[in-house]
Image (cartoon, rainbow, N blue to C red):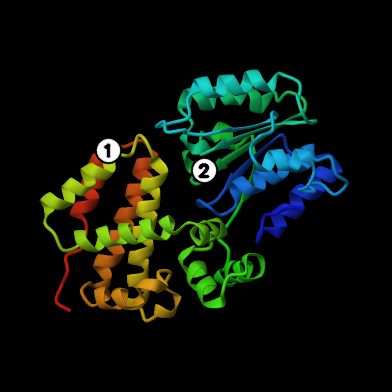
């Protein structure tokens, strides 16, 4: 069975296309981290190679091997600690694509973080997108599709996975993971509609611990001088080439925090994301004006965009540090 929750329309589209024999040779799955892109891609890979009657059955040898990333015909291409997905990785993928399936009936290639394809790699990929070998399925996963070459985007069928409503995440945690209602409510709010994050946080305390540490760093930065802020920017920038995703998550968390302040200032505190920090948020909101909050949110969004376009990370983050609003009297 399909394991993606909350994206029933997309599941139905793929299921009907599979049964009708008219799947696109390449799909572009777009959505925030942990929203279900990889789960959906692996589910389709299972359906294409399933040995059961109801595809994907989830229980046959093929489905289980794919779920464990141990199937010879399923390949995931990602950053793997690099700054970008390089042309050598795509050339190796294309070489594999010319081979007949080894275990199942179809080869499936999942490019995770497709927006990080180098220009050379993206141009190399075009050949496979334009002339796909038989029995080959391509799945491109991206957070920011605008960073992909237009020629790559135009050759894929786009499927957008939007953040789920908080009640959907909450209900899934209660019904499928037997989470207590109060804990499910908190995790659902913190997840920003991404069920994968909530499930991960449920099983790994380090996720919520890391999140708390990042918010603590943000609060500290609002009360220190330029030199200490620049030191932090240098520290974060030094990690950029090794882990772009972590920096994106830091900025996303910060954007969520300042949006919560904006909601509180606007009298909409019932809708904040960081519900576990409610008291701190209300206290901090007293120190800022609406214009300062809005301006910094815009600055953070611009920083995310600039980093995605390979701007100098240290320079981008230093500019961001300069734009942190000044605290006023509470």
How far across and how far down the image is residue 299, in percent? Answer: 29, 54
Q: Can residue 167 be seen in this view?
A: yes
207 left or right of 170 in image: left
Q: In this orientation, which residue lies closer to the viewer: 69 or 223?
A: 69
Q: Name the element at disc 1.
A: loop
How far across and how far down the image is residue 90, in percent? Answer: 56, 24
Please say if 174 is above or below 221.
below
Give the CA separation, mark 1 to mark 2.
Answer: 25 Å
227 left or right of 158 in image: left
Please say if 154 is above or below 100.
below
**Numbered circle sitting on residue 238:** 1
Q: Can residue 23 be seen in this view?
A: no
Q: Name the residue under label 2.
A: 145
Do the CB atoms of the residues marked 1 and 2 lie less than 8 Å apart?
Answer: no
Residue sitting farthest toward the bottom: 267
Quadrant housing residue 107? top right
68 left or right of 88 in image: right
Please say if 95 is above or below 258.
above
Q: Name the element at disc 2.
A: helix
């Amino acid at each position: 069975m399909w394991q993606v929750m909350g994206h029933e329309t997309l599941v139905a589209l793929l299921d009907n296309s599979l049964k009708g024999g008219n799947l696109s040779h390449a799909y572009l799955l777009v959505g925030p981290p942990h929203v279900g892109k990889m789960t959906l891609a692996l589910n389709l890979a299972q359906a294409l190679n399933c040995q059961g009657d109801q595809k994907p059955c989830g229980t046959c040898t093929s489905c289980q091997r794919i779920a464990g990333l141990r199937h010879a015909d399923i390949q995931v291409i990602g950053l793997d600690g690099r700054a970008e997905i390089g042309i050598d990785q795509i050339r190796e993928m294309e070489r594999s694509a010319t081979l007949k399936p080894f275990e199942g009936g179809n080869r499936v290639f999942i490019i995770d973080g497709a927006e990080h394809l180098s220009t050379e790699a993206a141009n190399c990929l075009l050949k496979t997108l334009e002339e796909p070998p038989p029995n080959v399925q391509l799945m491109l996963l991206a957070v920011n599709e605008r960073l992909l070459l237009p020629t790559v985007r135009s050759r894929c069928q786009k499927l957008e996975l939007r953040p789920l409503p908080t009640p959907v995440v909450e209900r899934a945690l209660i019904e499928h993971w037997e989470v207590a209602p109060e804990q499910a409510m908190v995790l659902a709010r913190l997840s920003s509609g991404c069920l994968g994050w909530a499930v991960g946080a449920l099983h790994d305390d380090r996720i919520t611990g890391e999140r708390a540490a990042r918010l603590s760093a943000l609060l500290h930065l609002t009360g220190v001088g330029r030199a200490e802020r620049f030191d932090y920017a240098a520290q974060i920038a030094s990690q950029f080439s090794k882990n772009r995703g972590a920096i994106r998550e830091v900025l996303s968390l910060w954007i969520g925090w300042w949006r919560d302040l904006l909601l509180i200032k606007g009298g909409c505190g019932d809708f904040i994301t960081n519900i576990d920090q409610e008291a701190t948020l209300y206290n901090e909101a007293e120190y800022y004006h609406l214009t300062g909050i809005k301006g910094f949110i815009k600055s953070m969004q611009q920083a995310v965009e600039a980093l995605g376009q390979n701007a100098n990370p240290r320079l981008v983050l230093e500019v961001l540090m300069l734009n942190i609003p000044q605290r006023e009297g509470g």
